[in-house]
């Protein structure tokens, strides 16, 4: 009799658990459905607003979306003999673009490292200023490179320097955030050991922290270099020099120079693919020890 009573109680408990589980599942499905509905409404409303303010209606111009690529490809095929010469002509601008990205990445990662160390609990030189350094990286990361570049071009004039400074500032914010997350996972015992023998703050960071985080720092830095090459090419469209500036000129003149635009597209595409592959191989070696 006791066993039957216990079994009845167990069955009642299982029914209650099942009932609660089904209730929570229905509630989660309801919330998910509401969120999807809100997303769809916002997307449709935003698209309708953007289409109404567009110079030409999206739906009216949708059938022409492939006209420009078709014109570029057809002219490139027609003038295929000119492509090698145009590719050679684009190389100096490509080198300028890579230089902009490389210098900006080095400067941005340097400042990002400084902000990350000063903004990490347990490592900061001035713990009370940790929120200040974190807000600085938030601000630098929140402002797009193109906005910074436009302001700097207005002040300094067109050229590669505004692009380099704009990309470096944004990189400092992004790397400061990523590097600080890496710093939060370091083993503090070497730092404490160095502090116990009288090492100053810079030595504690250099000898106790950097050996642990350097592979991840380099991995993130190489990944950011890929992003910065693309950003440098894009900033050329606003007058910041590099291969993007040459591409804008070729596209602005339109028919007759589309073969030049096609050559620049080819150079840019091949460069980005090569940098991506080399960077991926190096990052894999750094993070997995060549395995």
Image (spheres, helix red, strand yellow):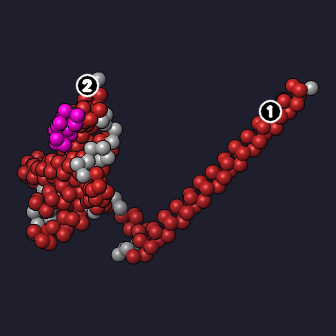
Compute the Cα span from label 2 to label 1: 55 Å
Residue 244 vertical placement versus 9 (above, below): below
Q: Please state, as top left, top right, bottom left or bottom right, where the C terminus lies in the image.
A: top left
Q: Residue at x 24, y 66 (%)?
A: 147
Instruction: Name, please, the residue furthest toward the right.
Output: 1
Residue placed most toward the observer, 231 or 200: 200
Magenta segment, principal secondary structure?
Answer: helix
Q: Residue at x 28, y 51 (%)?
A: 127
Look at the image and give the residue range highlighted in magenta. Answer: 195-207
The crowd level at tag 1 (other Cα within 10 Å; few <14, some 14-19, many 20+) is few
Q: Is residue 28 left or right of residue 66?
A: right
> For residue 290, which numbered disc appears in the image?
2
Q: Residue at x 25, y 29 (%)?
A: 285
Residue placed most toward the observer, 286 or 200: 200
Residue 22 vertical placement versus 291 (above, below): below
Q: Position of residue 156 (x, y in %)?
A: 10, 68
Residue 97 vertical placement versus 192 (above, below): below
Q: Position of residue 160 (x, y in %)?
A: 11, 59
Task: Name which quarter of the figure residue 278 lies in.
Answer: top left
Q: Is residue 95 visible?
A: yes
Q: Position of residue 173 (x, y in %)?
A: 26, 55
Read off the residue under disc 1.
10
> For residue 35, which numbered disc appears in the image?
none
Q: Is residue 78 visible?
A: no
Check if residue 273 falls in the magenta segment.
no
Instruction: Name, please, the residue furthest toward the top.
Output: 291
Check if residue 199 falls in the magenta segment.
yes
Q: Earlier in the sequence, mark 2 or mark 1?
A: 1
Label 1's element?
Answer: helix
């Amino acid at each position: 009799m006791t066993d039957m009573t216990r079994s009845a109680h167990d069955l009642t408990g299982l029914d209650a658990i099942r009932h609660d589980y089904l209730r929570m599942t229905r509630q989660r499905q309801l919330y998910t459905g509401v969120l999807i509905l809100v997303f769809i409404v916002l997307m449709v409303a935003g698209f309708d607003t953007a289409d109404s303010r567009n110079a030409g209606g999206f739906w009216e111009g949708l059938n022409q979306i492939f006209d420009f690529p078709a014109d570029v490809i057809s002219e490139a095929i027609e003038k295929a003999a000119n492509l090698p010469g145009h590719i050679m002509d684009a190389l100096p601008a490509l080198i300028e673009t890579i230089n902009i990205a490389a210098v900006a990445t080095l400067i941005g990662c340097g400042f990002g490292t400084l902000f990350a160390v000063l903004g990490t609990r347990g490592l900061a030189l001035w713990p009370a200023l940790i929120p200040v350094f974190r807000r600085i990286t938030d601000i630098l990361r929140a402002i797009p490179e193109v906005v910074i570049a436009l302001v700097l071009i207005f002040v300094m004039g067109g050229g590669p320097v505004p692009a380099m400074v704009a990309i470096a500032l944004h990189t400092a914010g992004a790397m400061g955030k990523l590097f600080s997350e890496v710093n939060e996972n370091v083993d503090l015992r070497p730092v404490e050991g160095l502090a116990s023998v009288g090492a100053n703050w810079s030595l504690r960071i250099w000898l106790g922290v950097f050996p642990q985080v350097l592979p991840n720092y380099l991995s993130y830095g190489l990944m950011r270099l890929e992003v910065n090459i693309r950003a440098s090419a894009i900033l050329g469209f606003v007058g910041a020099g590099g291969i993007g500036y040459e591409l804008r000129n070729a596209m602005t003149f339109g028919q007759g120079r589309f073969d030049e635009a096609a050559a620049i597209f080819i150079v840019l595409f091949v460069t980005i693919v090569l940098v991506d592959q080399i960077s991926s191989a190096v990052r894999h070696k750094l993070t997995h020890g060549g395995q």
